[in-house]
Image (spheres, grey):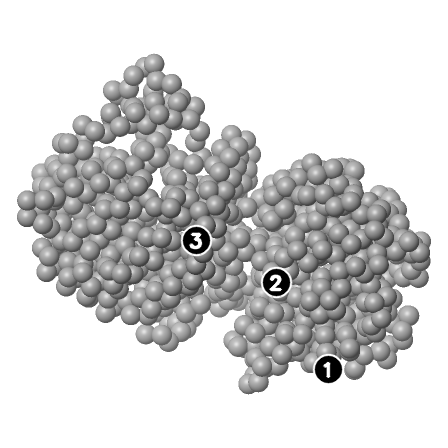
Amino acid sequence: MSAPVMLGMPGPPPAPRGVGNLRGEESFPAAARHALADTQLRQNLGNATRTIRAKRAQVVAEVPDWEELREAGRQLKVHTMAHLPEYLAQLEHAVTAHGGVVHWARDAAEANAIVVGLVRAKGIDEVVKVKSMATQEIGLNEALEAAGIAALETDLAELIVQLGHDKPSHILVPAIHRNRAEIREIFLREMADVDPELTDEPAALAGAARKHLRRKFLSAKVAISGANFAVAESGTLAVVESEGNGRMCLTLPETLITIMGIEKLVPRWQDLEVFLQLLPRSSTGERMNPYTSMWTGVTPGDGPQEFHLILLDNGRTAVLADESGRDALNCIRCSACLNVCPVYERTGGHAYGSVYPGPIGAILSPQLTGIEDNASLPYASSLCGACYDVCPVKINIPEILVHLRAKHIETYAAEHRVPTAEASAMTAAAWLMSNPTRWKLALRGGRLGRILGRKRGVIGEVPLPLVKQWTDSRDLSRPPKQTFRDWWAKEHGTSTGPA
Amino acid sequence: MKIALFITCLADAMFPEVGQATVRVLERLGHRVEFPQQQTCCGQMHVNTGYQRQVLPLVERFAEVFEPYEAIVAPSGSCVGSVRHQHTMIAERFGAAGLVERVGAVAAKTYELSEFLVDVLNVTDVGAYFPHKVTYHPTCHSLRMLRVGDKPVRLLREVQGLELVELRDAEQCCGFGGTFAIKNSDTSTAMLGDKMRNVLGSGAEICTAGDSSCLMHIGGGLSRLRAGARTVHLAQILAATREAPLMLVGGQAAAGTTTGPEAGR
């Protein structure tokens, strides 16, 4: 179970290609280039992340034992992952005992097929949905549409994204890239029953969405949700949300279908105490989220009378098999790492290609799909470490990014006979650096750069590969006449210091 | 105390004046500094770019070269961060038995300059003089890997003539990130743009920090724009005195009395 996966050995399968939303069409640098040019996006993201960062910082600072809470959250997650098979079996047993039906889905395609089958059996063509990352991941809405079933998103931001024929760009605030003027325009264009006099006041926009959704809540026969947590010992599922749309979906329809990644477990009911403190403060910057809905199987005469739980793998077992990367599964989807990330703040979420953007996406998506399908994501970070500082379960994101970079380099080297130019350069540099005499001579080669810098005292634009990537936007310092070690040898002789 | 200077490959090749300034500050405080000439590089660039196996000889070399000293001081938060956090990982994964303990012992006595001055030598006033308006950028690895906190600022507050002004969003990365600046140059430049805007907004003439790499990035951007502000390493400010002031000449900062490579540059 804990044996390291050797290269070339068949391991657990990654999330399959051709289904779901874990892979982008472009590499991160290419997608980021487009996003960075969108000035409206830059403004919207800058304002939104700045606001939410400040809110989070304030409510975290008022918790005296925040660090202990983080450590408790981390340990609970590490423990759960180490005993995942047992806890999953316990959950299945408990849900079944309370009248629910548990389905196991190896991947996105299986999960989608199960949902389509369940909805078709009801003979309906419309379902309501609670905001859920798992269903975004597997491309459920697309699969339902292909089967002639309309899926209505009921979270306000997801509704904005859906009506705008857009993709979510943030885990918690999927329409963070939109401002209220854009939202008004989308509503006027796409919402059949909207008041043509609609203003861009937030209350007016929310009111329009509320009216639009209310009729659907009352008529829907089937709801589809994700889950924030599942308690193994009791079989209880939990969804936390802000708008009450989740509560409507989870209680009004006759049938509820919940799709949950297998890593969302907590062993005991009391463990929720830790996560229900960590999550709202980290995500929305609230002391407590407005709605926490919990249900255990079915209760006669109260709420949905038919409950299906779909447990989704879709590459998670492959992540669990990597000792150095598996902590990515500990994520509770708070998105604090997105809000503090200087890269995310400037590029937005779409540049990451996957439904999981930002620092957590950069370590989760490549592991779920296999590194070769998201190879540019582990490099989409300056390793500044801001994400690690805010993570409520202390995932060492920079360390995993570095691990995945190594995994990418080694996977490539194992599969190709000719090394990349970068690999050759790195090997050469290591060779030079492993011997002081070679290194001393190599350093003197920097003097060639003095010629380039003789006019201004700095090196301006140089149209050579790699150098160009630097000098396009920054001058390069002119190398000195003498390296430090040459200066030292001249001043002190070569005998200083042990040989 | 037997102190060794860990120059870092970047300062060795590109910014020897930063190494000279580090030596000058420590000598002025009455310490003798040695420069073990067998040192090369900590290997951070390799590790962070994904070339971990190649780094083992560098990690072994670092431990071997610096083991004999009581303290190892470097003018870089980032390279010290690599020694403290990455060398053990490399030793664990690829090293021979016993290497983990050796690199751990050396890492425990390896300090970034401001840490060494404030925590080990217990000084904040190093007798420096630098009559300029300065803002301080806390580099990411100094801030979040080493947790140097306000140590650099405490040192700067004691510098005579220096007016310290606040940098907005100081804790945000400047966008350097090693090979990130090349591989994701557009995003890196966007981050740099905001950092420069805040440096210029502070009204400072000088942006200082404890890392030559980040300063090379911010300074390279400021220079390209002819922005009227420049970067100077913390060690150079601390090394400057009334008797031997730091002369800001052209695009470079040069120590007035040094016989080093920057004189007459």
User: Who is closer to the viewer here, A57 or B140?
Assistant: A57
Distance from the alpha carbon under mark 3 to that under mark 1:
45 Å
Amino acid type, label 3: Val
Pointers 2 and 3 within a single chain: no
The answer to which quarter of the image holds residue B73 is: bottom right
- The C terminus of chain A is located in which quarter? bottom right
Distance from the alpha carbon under mark 2 to that under mark 3:
24 Å
Query: Which residue, given by chain and number where applicable, does mark 1 sit on?
Result: B68
Pointers 3 and 1 within a single chain: no
What percent of the width, then of the height, locates residue A207? 30, 25
Q: Is residue B243 above or below residue A89?
A: above
User: In front of the other: label 2 or label 3?
Assistant: 3
Query: Which residue, given by chain and number where applicable, does mark 3 sit on?
Result: A63
**Mark 1: few, some, or many residues within 10 Å (few <14, many ≥20)?**
some
Task: State which chain disc 3 sits on.
Answer: A
Amino acid type, label 1: Pro
Q: In what element is the residue under mark 2?
A: loop
